[in-house]
Amino acid sequence: MFAFHRRPLQLAAAVLVAFVGSVAGQIPASVQVQQAAHAASRVPPSQYFSANDALEINTYAIADMTDDGKWIALTQAVRRDGFGNDYRRDGDPTYVRPALVRLWSVDARTGQRVAIFPDKKAVRGMRWSPDGSLLAMLVWNNDAYEPAVWNRATNKITTLKMPAGKYVAETSDLRWIGNGTVVVAAHTSEWRKKAQDAFKNITAGPVFVQNSKDPFLSWDELRRMGARRSVGAIDVKTGQYRELIPEAQLTTFNLAEDGSWLTYGEDQTKKTEYEAVGNDSKLLLRSQATGETRTLMASTRGAQFVWSEDGKKFAYSRDGRVYVGTVPDTATRLIAGPPEPPRGAPAPADSAAPGGRGGRGGRGGGAAGPDRFTASRFSPRGDALLLSNRDGLWVHDLNSNTRDLAIATSDSNVTTPRATFAAWSDDGSKLYFTTASRTKWERGVVRYDRATKTTRELIKDGRTYGNLRLSKDGNTVFLTVTQGNRLGEIYSADGDLQNLKRFVDANPQLSSKKFGPTELLSYLDVDGHSKYAVVHYPADYEKGKAYPTVFIIYEDFFDDTWDVAANILAANGYLVVKPAVDFETGFPGEAWLKGVTAAANKLIEMGVADSARLGVHGTSYGGYATNLLVTQTDRFKAAINISGKVDIISFYTDSPRLGVRNITAAERQQDRIGATLWQQPQKYVAHSAIMFADRVKTPMLLITGAQDSNVPADNTREMYYALRRLGKEVVWVNYMNGGHGGGNATADDFVDMYKRMVEFYDSKLKKKGDAKAN
């Protein structure tokens, strides 16, 4: 993938936007519940949120903003148009599913729009030229993306042709050199045929042979083919194409703003690796004036890179140390972190490495010491670097080699809010951070002034703020503002975040829909650890009434973010609870028993959950958790597993299209087993729900996508046949064209899946007189 410099964070994330309700300040949760319940009684009873409503939700995104903040490239997508992925093509490096969007150029001051295309178009990679007069983009045409440029003054689009035998690479981004040249990555037609033939051989044969003496797993080799690219520049006026980097195994690509130097990573990994994280690349430097290429770093293994906007400075983090260098020099200097160890000293042991046979271990993943740092962002002018460590976020002045704490934050201290870098003013004098309390729904934006070394709180309330974009003059800010349990809206403001105004009314149709209130619930798990759960009250919530309750489980939950499943269930009369759980490496299966049941006890004590009508479900890792949970307790009267594994032993070496993902996930990542299958086989047995299917007393609905290459449907299938053999109640719904998540191939599948889920819960958790499904 490209790594571009021009306002890298401000342009990084798409802004997800939909209807936002009231923008009033935070109200205590108990008051919110009462007020929302009272207001809900005045809404016509037919106005409930449904799966069909979810299909019509608009998502707006600011694709790019001019440096002066005057013009925006704005996209609009409808969820209904997002279906159609061919999951059978997962792992094919030549496969692209173009996404249809509406694209506008918008006057940021007035909101006036100009349609760049008359209708929906498959287009991506939009980038304004430095002077804001041209918008470059990649436009789908037949079987490939083509670079094109829209002229704001003339409202005309010019398609830029690639040389014969070349086309824009499927993973290519797009950027500018000055105002007249665009840069893309390219594949050849010969490469595409070779990659398609390889994919066909792996998936269709007629004979597919694998040999352990081959350096790479076959799917790894195919995935690596996607990185075999060249890089070229196209003159916008003449259409002339010139090659900047000849075809190579490219992992990263950076271009100096003036086009003088290119730096790129070339993959030099020798074989499929099971314990190393990431690939091994060498970092190369190429002069555009002379064509000279030399090695900047022999191996990037374990290093995290950050580049300045002009592409001439870089920083990297490794082993808690931060180094800074300047192109074209190859020398670097240590600016933060512990002193370098003496030559020949052994490397520190990896605490995350799989352990041997043994008993209970620690919780793992201890916080790094205060002397260990990670590079985060360069200032726009490259004279300072934002660093992070256990204590917070620091601004390191590269000229004076001094460091100041900009904002304190620590994952081990719940009294300090979480803080995330949001933007840096163009002159480098001010930094914006979004903040969020760890104990209540209180969020905001703060600004740090480097001259005075002070932090000013610009806004703080119950809403969530993100995707902050700052114009070059610092006078205009665009950001996402989200009221709890709604999707965010794009807002505009001045540099002090005053005069906050909604910029787009994305989904006015949802204003008439009926939504229940949400609440942040504090409770103690079985071990006495303080945890939180997000509670979605039914759309027709009545105080003092106990409701059938569905627990949606995964890992940690805290924020009251938009949740389609929770809102559909709440619209159908369910109390929906998303509890957080505590994990211990080596014993993850206990987490949900200790956390979810404790949350259930709390809600029953409050009188809002009916103890006789509890359901539970999850997707992916949450589906896995659901199946493990119901082998340990019979408190739940209905359970739904969506695309969750049930047999971690067979899963361990399954999903070949993901390479070694499942092995590393089990040993030292999400599954948290903490050992290989052969070191501690008993733990793999203990965390495979299929081994304890005879203990399941909860009726189950299993939902899979037949084309799921993440958690193959065959894994979940094991539970269906086991429960049927044991005389248990179970239903298996397999969406034959679906991928991970089940019913996601078509809009009809999406609606069908939610209909089945609601009907299943209704049949197990509702009693005579309860509201029927909407």
Image (cartoon, helix red, strand yellow):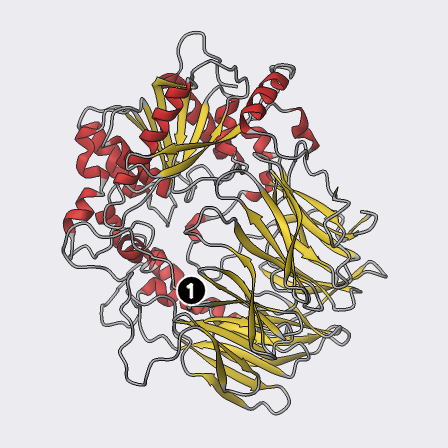
Whether residue 494 is visible to the viewer of this picture, yes or no, is yes
Relative image position of residue 198 (x, y in whole percent): 39, 65
Q: Is residue 396 above or below residue 761?
A: below
Kind of element beneath mark 1: loop
- x, y percent for residue 497: 72, 49
Marker count (numbered): 1
Q: Which residue corresponds to mark 1?
A: 370
Name the quadrant containing residue 424: bottom right
Taking depth in this image into account, of 301 and 703 the one nearest to the observer is 301
Picture residue at 71% right of the left edge, 66% below the top: 426
- Which residue appears farthest toward the top when viewing the image? 769
Closer-to-camera residue (466/72)? 466
Front residue of 14 and 170? 14
Neighbour class for label 1 at 10 Å: few (<14), some, many (≥20)?
A: some
The residue depicted at 83 percent of the width and 48 percent of the height is 110
Quadrant housing residue 548: top left
Tell me if residue 15 can be seen. no
Q: 762 left or right of 476?
A: left
| Residue 528 spot, x, y in % from top left | 31, 36
Residue 397 on image: x %, y % = 59, 74
Amino acid type, mark 1: Pro
